[in-house]
Amino acid sequence: MSLFRKYFVLFALSLGYAASYMLPYIKYVFYDQLLAGINCNNEQAGFLLTVYTMMNLALYIPGGWVADKFKAKYVIVASLLGTGLLNIAFAMNMNYSFALVVWVLLAFSTAFAFWSGVIKAIRLLGSAKEQGKLYGFFSSGVGAFSAVVSAVGLYVYGLFTMDAVAGLKGVIYVQGAACIISSIIVFFFFEEAEDAAEESEDDKFKTSDVLKVLANPMTWAISILIFCGHGIYTSMSYFNPYMTNVIGVTMAFSGVLAIVRTHLLRLCCGPLGGIFADKVKSPGLILIICFSLMTLLLVVFILLPAGANSVMVIGLQLLLAAITFTAYSILYSCIEEVGIPRKLTGTTVAVASMIGYLPDMIYNPLFGIWLDKYANTGYLYIFSFLAASGLVGLGCAYLIRRNSVTAHASTTTA
């Protein structure tokens, strides 16, 4: 596969991934418009996301099996088409009862086999030497296309200044179109790398291989590593209220920082993790460095005195975000480093995702309780908790690196 074709498909996957998750999480951007559009209250809107998350957890493992059993290309195309059509159907029939159905079906099209299929497809796009770079540019692409699709959606929304619900429908049509465009590109241009496509009968996935994934200690090391990395990544949003409530910057300036942190730094730092990992031929080594620095910076935030210089705090926050995005982009590339067979990628990703994304359900309620109970002191609890997560992640990265070095030494000796 040509270099252009490879990265064209990679960025199509980034586009599809970015657009796929916009509808289930649309209330984060168009909260009031969604409530008006489907005529529901706050509790009902929250229940949509609860249903979606619970379905995701139930579908990760069987979805990983499907992703390993069938060609990644067809799994992704079917998922993207399904998500695109669900966006269009919802925009055409916007009410709460139908929304419940759509959010359940979105779990099948975005979490069932799609995520495992995407990770498998990225792995199959290139050789073992390219894994870090591929995952890094994919992560960067997701950040870029999230911003692009959101910008186009906001432009369309702005065309309906007199009708917020009509504007919301326009946004959803844009999201659906992005999914369908991505599916078409993947269908016509995706090819597995030559060394990835070669597969004997003994190499083909069997249902019994699920037990091999579950019995592999590295599956659990990767799962806990992703749990810690995703937990710190998703908790970066708490720096918004921290900057306003503790440091004293304006809400507008905190919003600008959030945009720089969420979009610009992800776009710039995503490829760095992959480039560094491929350079040293070990994502685990880069993750050891990143988790060490992340933990150290979180300890610094714990020790910051009241009235700390705002410029210094802003710099520390952006540095922490940059390192976090660098690490986040290569978490899944450890699957290649620990030597898990490519036929088991989907199932491994499913197990890792099921555990790795639990912070979405655990961290927010826990941190909310601390902030409600202890006010600004709650941030010290949050930073301490995240620093502990960083130490656990560091331990997992060390185990992955040690496993890789031991396996390489054994191969060299043999």
Image: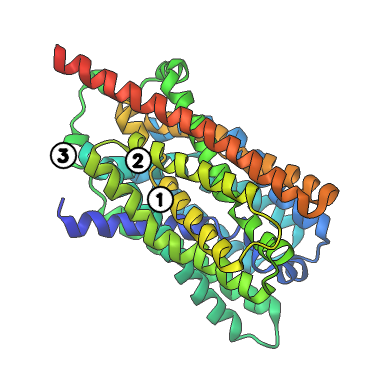
- Contact (Cβ within 8 Å) of mark 1 with mark 2: yes
Quadrant in the picture for residue 127: top left
* Separation of residues labelled 1 and 2 (CA atoms): 9 Å
Residue type pointed to by label 2 = Ile
Quadrant in the picture for residue 268: bottom left
x, y (%) of residue 212?
A: 41, 16
Q: Nearer the viewer, residue 411 or 155?
A: 411
Res. 321 in view:
yes
Q: Residue at x 53, y 38 (%)?
A: 390
Res. 65 in view:
no
Residue located beneath label 2 in the image: 286
**Mark earlier in primary sequence (3, 1):** 3
Secondary structure, mark 3, is helix
Residue type pointed to by label 1 = Thr
* Separation of residues labelled 3 and 2 (CA atoms): 27 Å
- Residue 111 higher or lower than 211, as above or below: below
**Which dot marks residue 194?**
3
Q: Nearer the viewer, residue 262 or 196?
A: 262
| 157 with respect to 68 (left or right) | right
Q: Residue at x 70, y 79 (%)?
A: 164
Residue located beneath label 1 in the image: 326
- Contact (Cβ within 8 Å) of mark 3 with mark 1: no
Q: Nearer the viewer, residue 199 or 214?
A: 214
* Separation of residues labelled 3 and 1 (CA atoms): 28 Å
